[in-house]
Amino acid sequence: KNFAGAEVVPRHEITFSDIGGQGAAIQELREALDFIRNYQEIKRLGIRPLKGILLTGPPGTGKTLMARAAAGYTDAAFVSCSGSEFIEMYAGVGAQRVRRLFQTAREMAAKQNKSNALIFIDEIDILGGKRGQTTSHHEYDQTLNQLLVEMDGMKVNDKVRVLVVAATNRVDMLDPALLRPGRFDRQVKVDLPDRQGRLEILKLHTANKPLAEDVSLEELARETFGFSGAHLESLANEAAILAMREDCQAIFHRHFHEAVDKVMMGDRLDRRPAV
Ligand code: ATP
């Protein structure tokens, strides 16, 4: 960690093939990223460079994974942070952090000899909520303004070209200024996986685990309607833990079954209203 709270990932370990059940979203994201890869062509034709992509959808569906894969795909230095890190009690601190974030991204790219940098901002709604709605949130406004200033200042001829990928599950909360052309003008929906998607994700997360012969991932995919990728990852992990508790050499179907209940319970507890 070098920027206050921002995680600087050294190498992009994540690729699109690590993401299950998001074929359409990945396709759309790839098309947008191809713009960046064809930078010379963009410049020649005078096309406005793509500066921001907004990933929308419920928690745990793989938005962070997509951003990491996007950095790998565009050979970009990757810097990630969350909208909540910009909220401070003192005026100007959030805005200063935004400036530092962009600076860090450019420095990282230069250090890694890359001409692209990708900044991932999770939970952008926290810093990019509609401005001027409550007087006590003046600080948020300054932070959001600074983000707009940074994005507007990005030019096609910059030594390091920056792409901002942001994630939210409350796109309706965002200040419309963020969605204007030249800012986050590309939106990619990352929804909960369907049955086939859940199967793909289960396969990914059990690939490194010994499965007993009675395990049917197809059946589990059918039974986990409404589960996100994060739920399914947790399901595979819980099943393995249950198998270990019983000293089993492999994970049996009953372990997965029990884990389904556990994950569903855990989720219900997570959703207790915040105080
Ligand atoms: P949040 O909005 O809560 O930050 P997110 O959409 O960014 O969630 P991730 O952080 O990408 O979700 O996912 C959390 C974890 O869940 C991942 O590290 C991965 O293990 C698993 N996961 C989520 N979605 C997928 C997917 N589509 N394929 C494979 N694994 C997934």
Image (cartoon, helix red, strand yellow):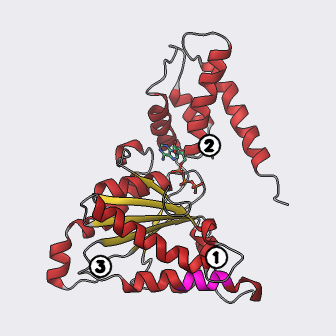
The residue located at (50%, 34%) in the rendering is: 202
For the residue labelled by badge 2, is the local secondary structure a helix, a strand or a loop? Answer: loop
Specify start and end residues of the magenta stretch as a single range: 139-145
Residue 244 in the image: above or below residue 121: above
Compared across the picture, whether 29 is left or right of 175 comes to: left
Magenta stretch, overall SS: helix
Compared across the picture, whether 244 is left or right of 19 comes to: right
Which numbered mark, 2 or 3, is in the foreground of this view? 3
The residue located at (49%, 28%) in the rendering is: 206
Q: Looking at the image, which is closer to me, 266 or 152?
A: 152
**Label 2 CB, ligand 1: below 8 Å?**
no
Q: Give amino acid for label 3.
A: Pro
Q: CA distance from mark 2 to mark 1?
A: 27 Å
Q: Which residue is mark 3?
A: 49
Q: Looking at the image, which is closer to me, 185 or 142?
A: 142
In which quadrant of the rendered view does residue 89 lie? bottom right
For the residue labelled by badge 3, is the local secondary structure a helix, a strand or a loop? Answer: loop
Residue 123 position, x and y percent, is 59, 65
Q: Which residue is mark 2?
A: 225
Q: Earlier in the sequence, mark 2 or mark 3?
A: 3
Residue 233 in the image: above or below residue 77: above
**Label 3 CB, ligand 1: below 8 Å?**
no
Q: Which residue is mark 1?
A: 173
Residue 137 in the image: above or below residue 264: below
